[in-house]
Image (spheres, grey):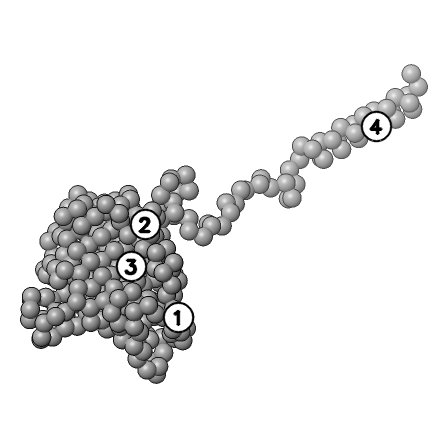
Amino acid sequence: MNRSILAVILVVFFGGLAFVTWEFLVPKPDDQPIVFTPPPTPPGYNERIGKEDPDAGLPKFFPAEPAVTALDKPAGGEVGLVDAVKGQHVRLVRGGKNMTPAKGETIYAQDLIVTGPQSRIRVKLGDGSVLNQGSNSQSVVNQFSYKDGESREVKFELSFGKILLDIRKWAHGGRNEFEVKSPSVVAGIRGTTIWADVEQDAMCVLEGKIAAKSRQDETKPEIEVPAGKGLKDLSSGKMTVFDVTPDDEKAYKDSILITD
């Protein structure tokens, strides 16, 4: 074979080999390994449990710590007793610990009453009033003092969710103060049935009457709300009065009451 032809063949062969080596085998700056970045945490995702767990839809305020079998007795006084529980996600929180209450469990002042999805609780207070709490809700009786026939002083607060509170009428003399507070309004009550819903931004009177004061606009005067009326637009401070229809009342009770 002609030496010139052989030289050309060798140049082409080794040139091609060098090209393949450079193009496919030699790492280059742009050939960094691909690092997978997980997507942002979606709203409502419960990091402590994980999306594969059926409890992943628990609200943010639901206790993250495992439930214990019993809670230490507090220094505060008794408020009432658990009368009924429905669903798996009901907790009493006291002193940084939580437990799943059963019927007959004692509720004390400052106990947080917490419910998760598809869960409800009914509590009979020491004065004969009844608290019904719906799902994804948190409430607390901050103060409870009751002497039958002499005096009653109760301060109840709903932080999240919804409640239906049937307050025993006070037919005695002496001091009687029953206060219901939500993030947007505080209501003084003299024996009535009300429902309050933080998500719907409303408070309604089913029986009796309340005297409501905005917590968002302290310059706004107190409003007296009779039975069959409600207040909405609470978070904006407007406190608009509206009519509560029988269908409204039925739908709300169906969503919150425990039927025995």
Q: Position of residue 59 (x, y in %)?
A: 35, 52
Tell me which numbered mark, 4 or 2, is placed earlier along the sequence.
Answer: 4
Amino acid identity at mark 3: Ile
Q: Position of residue 156 (x, y in %)?
A: 22, 65
Gap in angstroms between the C-alphas marked 1 and 2: 29 Å
| Residue behind mark 2 | 116
Q: Position of residue 90 (x, y in %)?
A: 26, 48
| Residue behind mark 3 | 163
Using the image as rendered, state which of residue 136 and residue 260 is in the foreground. Answer: 260
Residue 12, numbered label = 4
Q: Where is residue 52, by image quadrant?
A: top left
Amino acid identity at mark 2: Gly
Name the residue: 34% across, 48% down.
Answer: 117
Name above or below for residue 244 compared with residue 95: below
Callouts 1 and 3 close, C-beta under 8 Å: no
Callouts 4 and 1 close, C-beta under 8 Å: no
Question: Horizontally, is 30 left or right of 248 in the view?
Answer: right
Tell me which numbered mark, 4 or 1, is placed earlier along the sequence.
Answer: 4
Name the residue: 17% across, 64% down.
Answer: 168
Gap in angstroms between the C-alphas marked 4 and 1: 90 Å
Tell me which numbered mark, 2 or 3, is placed earlier along the sequence.
Answer: 2
Gap in angstroms between the C-alphas marked 4 and 2: 74 Å
